[in-house]
Amino acid sequence: MRGLIRSASAFFGSRFHSCVFALLERVPTVSLAYSYKSTGIMETLGLGEYVFDIDGFDKPTVLARIVSNLEEGEQMRRRIDATMSNLSFPTFASVLAEYAIEPTSGSSGPSSLTKLSLQQQ
């Protein structure tokens, strides 16, 4: 799916992960947010003007943002790239190293998620 999105000039979506894939590929994105997650990622990336509440958006404004993304494609790609380059994402291995499943003390019941303090060597 990311390969298809990567080849797009612009992306218009309402599903969180498809919008994230577009942003990861530096494709100019307009998002219809059905959840706070979509609004949050767009605002975090400084793209708050490109996210609209799915329950009450103005169609001409959304269309204008899509057209803007198409007309300013390379500039938008550079803007997304600059923001994304400043973010750091943890690797799956680092998350696993930080968290572990340990049995609850004195119980044969379910385990609890416990953060471990790891010493650097």
Image (tube, helix red, strand yellow):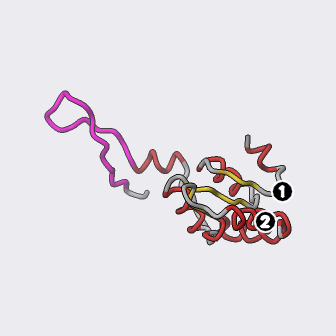
In this rendered view, identify the residue nearer to me: 19 or 80. Answer: 19
Give residue 69's mark.
Answer: 2
Q: Residue at x 36, y 42 (%)?
A: 100
Q: CA distance from mark 2 to mark 1?
A: 8 Å
Rendered position, 70 above or below 17: below
SS for callout 1: loop
Query: Which residue sits furthest left?
Result: 106
28 with respect to 37 (left or right): right
Q: Looking at the picture, how far across and down is residue 47, in whole percent?
A: 64, 69
Q: Residue at x 60, y 64 (%)?
A: 42
Q: Which span is picked out in magenta?
A: 99-118
Give residue 9's mark.
Answer: 1
Q: Residue 64 occupies which quadrant of the picture?
A: bottom right
Disc 1 marks which amino acid? Ser
Q: Are marks 2 and 1 in contact (CB under 8 Å)?
A: yes
Disc 2 marks which amino acid? Asn
Q: Which one is earlier in the sequence, the residue at label 2 or at label 1? A: 1
84 with respect to 3 (left or right): left
Give residue 20's mark.
Answer: none
In this rendered view, identify the residue nearer to me: 19 or 93. Answer: 19
Q: Does the segment drawn in magenta span residue 43? A: no
Q: Looking at the picture, how far across and down is residue 57, in whole percent?
A: 61, 61
Q: Does the segment drawn in magenta span residue 101? A: yes
Quadrant location of the C terminus? Answer: bottom left
Rendered position, 69 above or below 1: below
Quadrant location of the N terminus? Answer: top right
Q: Residue at x 42, y 58 (%)?
A: 120
103 with respect to 3 (left or right): left
Q: Looking at the picture, how far across and down is residue 95, in whole percent?
A: 47, 49
